Image: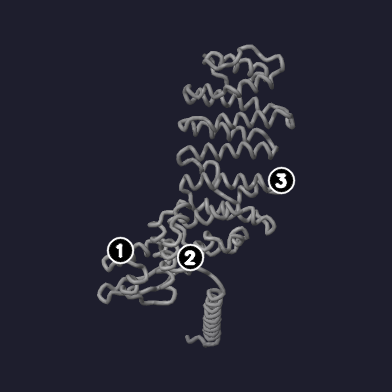
Amino acid sequence: MVIPTFIDMDEVGQCRELREYYAQIGAEIASESSPEGWLADLRDIINVCDACFKEKDADVESVLNSIVSLLIAVPPGHEMNPKLIGAFCQKLNSAPPKLGIVCIRVLQNLYEGIGANLGLKFEVYMALVEVAGKTKDQIHLVFNDINKLKSTFTAQQLGVDRIQRLLRQLHRVLIANRQSELASKVMIELLSTYTEEHASHAKDDAQRCIVSFIADPGTFLMDHLLTLKPVKYLEGEKIHDLLTIFVSDKLSSYTTFYNANKTFVDSLGLDHEQNLKKMRLLTFMQMAETKKEIAFQSIQEELQISEDKVEEFIIDVLRTKLVRAKVDQVNKRVLVTSTMHRTFGRPQWLALREILTKWQKNLAHVQRTVHTAIEMTQTVPLHT
């Protein structure tokens, strides 16, 4: 059986061969060409193109690329263009996971081949995200840089609604693929697309953002979320109260909140034990901000852990590199050398200014000393 691919044949001939191929493998399609022309043939072929998914991967890719070559040949601006590309993308979205890489390559060919029509490229990219998200560890082939994405698709060209739809899908796919850092950047970008006027419409997105930051075991600093307009709109609601606890409160505040709102926290899909673990780390960070020596007893009381768990907890803290410290086992204390601040507000800016001012003065002193040394060297007479 001849498998069609990119060949030196006109559109009518390609459609005829594709019709014959699909009829041979049992697809519900007539082998004769449509009297309406090759675009109608292409529509019929796309409607049954998933019939080839049961064939060998190389054959599948060859057939699908033949369809891509026809889609690229559709005249720009033709009314059938969006319908044909949309239907083709839907078929590839339904392909079995084993064909994920094949479908990604085919869609990338289509994306590059359809030219400057940004609306069509957007729809193909949406399909690429979906397919890559369902193909294990392949999302990086489609997305790895939020700035590059922003330069390709802009709200001015496509409209805010479509950009928000893309960012939501990306966030969902990245979370499913455990790409939490990229997912966070995408979610922040999504929330930034809402203006003051429309911030109230972002309630669901803002809640998803908060939940994803709390749930991510590698994310500890969340104070920047409080400045986002959609998050500000949630002030007074339980989800905002919960975020505030993770931003600046201690473990005791979380346990009190959870005991009073267990059903709510569980409904968010958050793991209570994971929340406790993160709040213990955050609470210790806060203790380390003001104390350079922390007794084991204080850690036990503040973090609600037993004496035999203290050293294990400190090791977990040090692994995060949020706090740098040494354990004094003899005197049962922790000696803090540095810590990252949970929040960075006016007090932290003032402290940073003081450090930079001292650094500037010290640098000026060093500069004067070096300058004096140079002058003395130049004025000392040489002895022979």
Quarter-of-image position of residue 112: top right
Q: CA distance from mark 2 to mark 3?
A: 40 Å
Label 3: how many Cα within 10 Å (few below 14, some 14–19, many 20+):
few
Residue bearing the label numbered 1: 312
**Left or right: 265 as drawn, with respect to 367:** left
259 up-or-down from 376: above or below: above
Give the structural element (helix, strand or loop) at label 3.
Answer: helix
Image coordinates for residue 27, horizontal then vertical, percent: 55, 17
Residue 67 point in image, percent of width and height: 61, 25
Q: Amino acid at mark 3?
A: Gln
Left or right side of 384 for 280: left
Which circle, 2 or 1, is nearer the viewer? 2
Which is more toward the observer, 376 or 117?
Answer: 117
Numbered disc total: 3
In this image, 284 relative to 45: left or right?
Answer: left
Query: Disc 2 vs disc 3: which is toward the camera?
Result: 2
Left or right: 116 as drawn, with respect to 329: right
Discs 2, 1 touching: Cβ within 8 Å: no
Residue that extends furthest to the top in the rendered view of this protein: 32
- N-terminal of the pair, mark 2 or mark 3, is 3
- The label number, if any, that marks residue 245 in the structure image: 2
Kind of residue indicated by mark 1: Glu
Is there a contact, CB below 8 Å, between mark 1 and mark 3? no
Q: Which residue is tagged 3?
A: 157
**Image point (71%, 18%), residue name:** 37
Locate residue 321, reporting x and y percent: 41, 64
Q: Residues within 10 Å of mark 2 (few under 14, many from 20)?
A: some
Q: Which mark is residue 77?
A: none
> Where does residue 384 sit, x and y in percent of width and height?
47, 85
